[in-house]
Image (cartoon, rainbow, N blue to C red):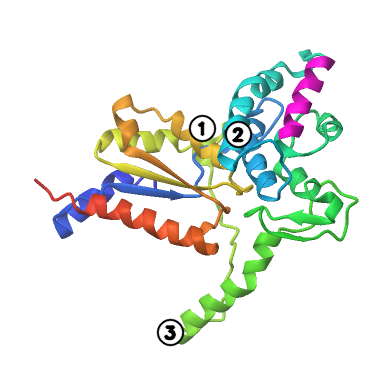
């Protein structure tokens, strides 16, 4: 979609006599480096911390913050400052420094500082989903960390499943099959996969992280009127919102095009349309986005 974005307005200009120069990215990801940690890549821990903070705040595990916005702002400042510097030092960080950083991570996640130290200051979303509500014997969802379920096996450092996914598999499958077979009258023996394992090809990303930042930047420079709406969920632990914020901040575009990018943040997670209040906000945001573009007639 990013690669073809620059050509969308040409099609609508020819067919309908109007510009529609917009790209909406719903829980999107532009750069896999922001999501795939490794010995030479600490970025996912830095960018993931604010989402852990938002989740802990939602579950009433954080104290000392007036609201979630304040908690997120402070978590983001810490993550991009002291936390990032600490991780970059690696083993060069002394014990006092490790303890100081662990105490701050504990404040923003509610996990005990001792646990943070055991994880060497690196709290993965998977570990967090198992440990945040450990005393309550509950696990968190991956797509939406507001969703919980009973934890039947607390011997592991990761949950057995994702309750935010298993909760929707049945309703989604039933709805799409009713629509395809009932409304459309189409019959097929092929199964419907709610979450399909697509045969992705990464040929263009050999020996590097797959990134679409350059493609989006090129599309925006090719079509300077193109607008981008970024839609992110606070409690999305599959694609933490700061992964997109980082990518957008690093787009190779001139400063004059930054005004064409807007963020909209939602209370829930990856599929924000499953929460009624977020679904209503999403509809409003998308309608405003479409109407602004569609109203611009060709001169």
The image position of residue 64, as x and y in percent, is: 69, 35
Give the mark nearer the N terminus: 3 vs 2. Answer: 2
Q: Residue at x 70, y 50 (%)?
A: 59
> Are discs 1 and 3 less than 8 Å apart at CB?
no
Label 1 to label 3, Cα distance in Å?
Answer: 42 Å
At mark 2, the secondary structure is: helix
Segment tinted magenta in the rendering: 95-107
Label 3 to label 2, Cα distance in Å?
Answer: 43 Å
Q: Is residue 204 above or below residue 144?
A: above
Q: Which residue is mark 1?
A: 246
The image position of residue 36, as x and y in percent, is: 64, 37
Residue 255 within the magenta-colored segment of the rendering: no
Q: Is residue 22 above or below residue 191?
A: above
Q: Which residue is mark 2?
A: 47
The image position of residue 178, as x and y in percent, is: 51, 82
At mark 3, the secondary structure is: helix
Q: Which residue is mark 3?
A: 183
> Are discs 3 and 2 less than 8 Å apart at CB?
no
Give the mark nearer the N terminus: 1 vs 2. Answer: 2
Residue closer to the observer: 109 or 70: 70
- Magenta span: chief secondary structure: helix
Q: Is residue 27 above or below residue 216?
A: below
Mark 2 crowdedness (10 Å alpha carbons): few <14, some 14-19, many ≥20: many
Q: How many marks?
A: 3
Q: Residue at x 63, y 26 (%)?
A: 78
Residue 104 within the magenta-colored segment of the rendering: yes
């Amino acid at each position: 979609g990013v690669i073809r974005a620059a050509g969308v307005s040409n099609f609508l200009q020819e067919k309908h006599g109007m510009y529609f120069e917009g790209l909406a990215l719903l829980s999107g990801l532009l750069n896999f480096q922001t999501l795939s940690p490794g010995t030479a890549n600490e970025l996912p821990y830095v960018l993931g911390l604010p989402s852990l903070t938002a989740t802990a705040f939602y579950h009433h595990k954080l104290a000392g913050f007036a609201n979630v916005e304040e908690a997120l702002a402070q978590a983001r400042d810490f993550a991009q400052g002291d936390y990032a510097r600490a991780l970059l030092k690696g083993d060069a960080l002394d014990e006092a420094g490790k303890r100081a950083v662990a105490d701050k991570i504990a404040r923003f996640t509610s996990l005990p500082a001792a646990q943070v130290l055991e994880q060497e200051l690196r709290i993965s979303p998977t570990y967090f989903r198992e440990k945040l509500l450990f005393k309550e014997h509950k696990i968190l969802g991956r797509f939406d960390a507001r969703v919980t379920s009973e934890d039947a096996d607390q011997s592991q450092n990761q949950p057995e499943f994702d309750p935010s996914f298993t909760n929707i598999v049945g309703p989604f499958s039933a709805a799409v099959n009713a629509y395809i077979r009932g409304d459309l009258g189409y019959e097929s023996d092929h199964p419907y996969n709610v979450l399909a394992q697509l045969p992705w090809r990464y040929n263009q990303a050999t020996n590097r992280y797959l990134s679409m930042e350059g493609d989006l930047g090129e599309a925006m420079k090719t079509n300077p009127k193109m607008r981008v709406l970024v839609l992110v969920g606070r409690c999305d632990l599959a694609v933490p919102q700061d992964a997109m914020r980082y990518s957008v901040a690093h787009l190779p575009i001139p400063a004059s095009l930054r005004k064409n990018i807007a963020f909209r943040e939602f209370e829930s997670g990856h599929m924000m349309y499953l929460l009624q209040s977020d679904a209503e906000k999403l509809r409003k945001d998308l309608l405003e986005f479409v109407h602004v573009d569609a109203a611009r007639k060709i001169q």
